[in-house]
Amino acid sequence: MLHSAVRFAAVRARAFGVALGFVAASLAPGAAAHAQGTGSVAGTVVNEKNGSPIGDAQIMVEGRNIGTTSDNAGRFRLAGLTGSGQVQLTVRRIGFQPRTVGANIGDANVRIALSERAMELTSVVVTGTAGVAEKRAIGNAVSTVNAAEVVATQPVNSFQDLLNGRASGVSIVASSGQVGTGSRIRVRGASSLSLANDPLIYVDGVRVDNTQASGPANQAFGSASISRWNDFSPDDIESLEIIKGPAAATLYGTEASNGVIQIITKKGAAGRPVWNVTARAGSSWVPNWLNRFEDNYGTVPRAGSATALDTVSISTKQLNDSLNARFGNDIFTSGQLQDIQMSVSGGTNAVRYYVGGGYEENQGAERVNRLRRTNLRVNLQANPSPSIDVQTSLGYTTGRTYLPYESGGGGATWATFFSSPSFLYGGVGVNARNPNNPQLGFRSGPPNAYYEAYDIFQDADRFTGSFQFTNRPTKWLNHRLIVGLDRLAENNEDRTPRNDILGATYASFAGSGLPTAGGISTSTRDVTLTSYDYVANADFQLSSSLKSVTSAGGQIYLRQTRFRSISGSTFPAVGLTSIASAAIRNVGSDELTQNNTVGAFVQQQFVWNDRLFLTAAVRTDDNSAFGTNFDAVTYPKLSASWVLSEEPSLRIPAFINQLRVRSAYGASGLQPGAFDAIRTYSASGGFLTPTSAGNPDLGPERSTELELGFDAGLWNDKVGLEVTYFNGSTKDAILSRQAPPSNGFPGLQLFNAGQVDRSGLEWVVRGTPIRRENVSLDLTLSGSVNTYNIASLGGTTDFVSLSSNVAHKVGYAPGAWWDRRIVSADYNASTKRATNLLCDDGNGGTVGCATAPRVFLGNSVPTQEGSFSAGLTLFKNLRVNAFVDWRAGYKKLDGNYRVRCGAFVLCRELYYPDEVQDKAQLAAVQAGTAYTHHLIHDASFARFRELAATYTLPNSIARRVGASRASITVAGRNLGLFTNFPGIEPEASFNGGTRGGAFGQWEQNVLPQLRQFVTTVNFNF
């Protein structure tokens, strides 16, 4: 594996090295000549726990007016030192404890290791603030993720892998184990009843497309499995900032009630060019797949009899043996991962740059599942004068993702999970027990037939760029303007090439052959998001202890989406797959959607002695989706932050070295869909037909929230504690009702009426119980619990059905599971059938199931999440990291059991009912798909997500290849699972559509999460 990584790196590095070298050469200013002689000290500043370099650290010589900062490689050099002997160097860096060390004048290899603070109030954040602010000045919680450190040592393949479990209150609802697929991200659960519950995403201050379910329809029931969040390379990300509710998101206004996640990309630091090369190679597979899936049962002709049948079973191992005998391959395989990333950064105090790029090839556990992606980033910072800063951030990614069918759409999982002995014995029209059926026991056909019949992929090109101009015309005034563009072009194709042999062999693939002779469907989705963001801050020192900061600003967000689809069928010859060559062509749709938001805010902050911060703000928004009768909406904000540990009049126990209390109240909103408020018509056959009644009074959902919390650093910052309590509600929640017949429009009409209340607790505990010369141990425990309750559904009803088993009901969580529940049944031993079924009547009694009401079966959205991580450093150069995360407090529907038992009659219970002790359970199974209560189970789980060991090579070895630092990491992902969920995989579900998305997660022939091992080599030059 290591040899593969190095070989792949060598091949790809040539191309990227030339490209990045050209860009860096054009950007890098001439290197400044260093002072020569013996009067200097040089070395590196590194992180004590993993040996990674620390940039922007301040190094000062005590007693002398000499200092410098470290570059991105952690390197520093102090020149102009007179005399001889030893000097004392004091090193400071935000987020780390300061340290003073001795060094001899003339030393060139001083190594200074800094320890991270468990609590840091002086770190700078930019999300949810009017400009740049320290954490101590903000009244709401802001979670940060040190992305650069995580990616350097952990098996992180995507942005969602990076975020998963590393911010309290943020849940990742995984969908599929297929390479290139994504997940649903939820911040503090789901509080909207009808609209998307997706948080906003920003990149370097620019709003970008946050679609979490896109791509070709490789999943059924309206679902798509690709997430646009994973377009951003984790290797280019410096950090993440997450604000979680209306109290924090007021300055983002409409659309921000579900939280905001900001990606902050890497920047250059003054100093000579620093090159970084990272190569990864690994493999991934479905764990224990030969024994993981249930055996299926069926009847086949008895040998030697024309009428008698035998009940037999078929296992995954039998299927795999048959497939190997016929095609020479396994059902699932081990996919290979290869990834090369390179970057160069540097510059002077006037101009700094970061240029990075990479190429990734990733193969899934199914032969046709693969991903190819290229990414490039160029970030520039310039200071043309002491009062002006200019910054550009440019990112581009392009690639293709091939996806097999799953989740009700067919594919290898469908063929395997729902196999049957009847597809193994006896061919078409052959009443014999000979294994001569070409399906080999698989449902519809063997996986190889699916791979040959369908070609499904997405091409995606995305450019995200921003320009930021900051000016400080006076010492009391600063203002900045950010202009940004996010441009996405998707092409989704689903091809069924003509294949007469395949169509004639398998009935399920008849469309490949005559008369249909194949087909193709393609769709494009082009999104352009333009952002304009301006803010000005006036800073006045009113007295020696009181400061005033007045801020005002505004934003304009322009979003345009163009969707087109076209299809064709009946190819005249094999090998033709273009729409132009199809005999029948159909234009599916051509839609243009625009949504624009204009907002402005003013904010006033008073600061007393730099330890008490009081802030008030108000924001006004107008959105193009609001009804014509709805005016602009206004959102208020109030917050306070008090650093008690710096208050001289308070006596705080000695073990508490930092203590801050904070509170925040605020509001934000979520606008309706682009066309929800207006009347719409459809054009067909030269006529206009009424489609939607619209609602001119329709406005945004409005969310308010109160946050209370504290942050503490204990025992000399060896322990850090952050605790946040929140309580809020969403009012004017959008609901639907039957449109009045008198207006001539059919269907439903949306209106504002509902209310959802919520509350919760979030916490993070960080500690370093062991910190010694050759060993240190740091631990982090984070988690959250929350509750949601529907307070109103408009007053005319207390129950709104979303599907046959998902509903909103007053007094319960949104989108919960509701269905009839069988509580008792008799059993007829002669007929082998459950009889006299009685169901829960919802009041503690029973009633005949034919008239039984739907009863509450559980929440469909997780109400608890958390993670635990541990990092052990040995002998300064070996770092071992372990990471476990969990979700709890929700239930999921086992659609595999539903299809196996209810639709295809494959369960053992149906053939041997005497074995079933719970006759109510047997009654539900024998009823086919009429009931789902027996399919909905607690899906709580804990997963041993990551284990990694990083060894930093001695400098003498690194220098042999010309590197200043070299490391090797061996890591595993998804190594263990702890759950009582009886289905195949608790982290498998439809990513959207009617069986996924906001509420009601189903698992149905979804590929389980893959186990992965990766070897990474990293070089700094």
Image: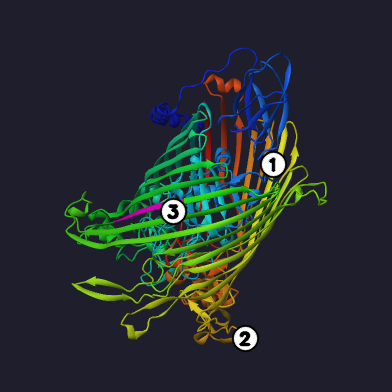
For the question of whether residue 985 can be seen, the reply is no
Tell me the residue that label 2 is attached to. 845
Start-end of magenta stretch:
523-533
Tell me the residue that label 3 is attached to. 227
Mark 3 lies on a secondary structure that is loop
Quadrant of residue 86 within the rendered picture: top right
Q: Report the front residue among 585 and 207.
A: 207
Decide if residue 442 is on the left or right side of residue 634. left
Magenta-colored stretch includes residue 528 = yes
Q: Report the front residue among 552 and 337.
A: 552
Place of residue 670 in the rendered image (x, y in percent of width and height, measured from the top left): 48, 65
Tell me the residue that label 1 is attached to. 117
Magenta-colored stretch includes residue 531 = yes
Which residue is located at x 39 percent, y 47 percent? 367
How dense is the environment of label 2, judged by Cα within 10 Å: few (below 14), some, or many (20 and up)? few
Quadrant of residue 790 within the rendered picture: bottom right
Which residue is located at x 18 percent, y 53 percent? 580
Measured Cα–Cα span from mark 2 to mark 1: 58 Å
